[in-house]
Image (tube, grey):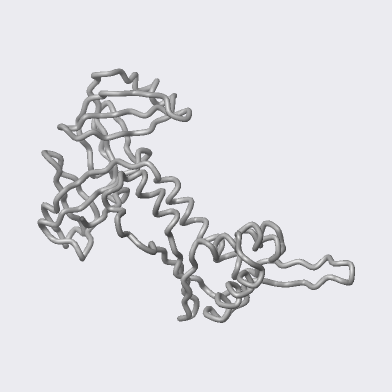
Amino acid sequence: MKPILLLYFFSSLVGLIQMPASELINELNLRVEYKINIDGNSFLLDQKKFNLLIYINESESITEAAKRSKISYRTALNYIDKIESALDIAIVNTKKGGSGGGGSTTLTEEGLQILKECKKINAIMELHSETNEIEAEILEVDKSKGVMKIQMNELVITIPLKKEYKVGDKILALISYDNIFIMLEPQASSIRNIFKGKVTEMRLQDEMVRVKIDIGGVNIFSDITLSAGKDLDLSLGKEVYIGFKALSIATLKL
């Protein structure tokens, strides 16, 4: 099978930057497009075409997949032809039935691989659908170490270097709740960002405990298991340390 390079981006970001992060990511899920590159050939797979591949794989029928995608059979065939022509591969196998029917359409190995890679991107986005939002400014760029420092109030955070950023740029840093670690004491580890704070809120959320921690006037949320909450003996007003890795931070330039 030919190697597949999958990139993803969003059809339009107009009007989205002002949304809260959770709403922003949900909206981006609807607008995500997948740029597929195979041997120098590329194709932009939007959500409708992605859904068509999902339904073909599930139903083994283009007719049924078109119906579930809410498009015509002719449009479904056109989508398939465009993908195959652009990438110079076959993404479906069609087996004709006899006079009594029995035909079927399945995805080829390449079609299945494309579907798998797109699903992986969706799973990652879903996993990080709830995030801490930190509006900050680029304070320092250290090219030798491949990192930058950003600042919000008194909070200074280390993030991975991005060549397009420069000192003074305003950015939005996004850190998913499940990437925030809570500790009773700072620990020596690969975690570059460790801060002291105070628990200000705790609530049960889908069999997890959502903890709100005040870090020098910046509110950070962390999702931990019930057993972890018990082990930490958390309570309102308790002083704790939080930590998160530099690589767990996504950024948007404002």
Q: Quadrant of residue 152?
A: top left
Q: For this view, does 112 lie left or right of residue 162?
A: right
The percent position of residue 49, horizontal first and vertical second, equals 55, 65
| Residue name at image x 45 percent, y 47 percent | 126
In-front residue for pair 2/55: 55
What is the number of callouts on the image? 0
In-front residue for pair 12/87: 12
The percent position of residue 122, horizontal first and vertical second, equals 47, 54
Q: Quadrant of the N terminus?
A: bottom right
Q: For this view, does 156 lie left or right of residue 173?
A: left
| Residue name at image x 65 percent, y 70 percent | 108
In-front residue for pair 40/28: 28
Q: Quadrant of the C terminus?
A: bottom left
Residue 51, compared with residue 240, is above or below; it is below
Q: Quadrant of residue 7?
A: bottom left
The percent position of residue 78, horizontal first and vertical second, equals 60, 75
Residue 93, compared with residue 183, is above or below; it is below
| Residue name at image x 49 percent, y 80 percent | 39
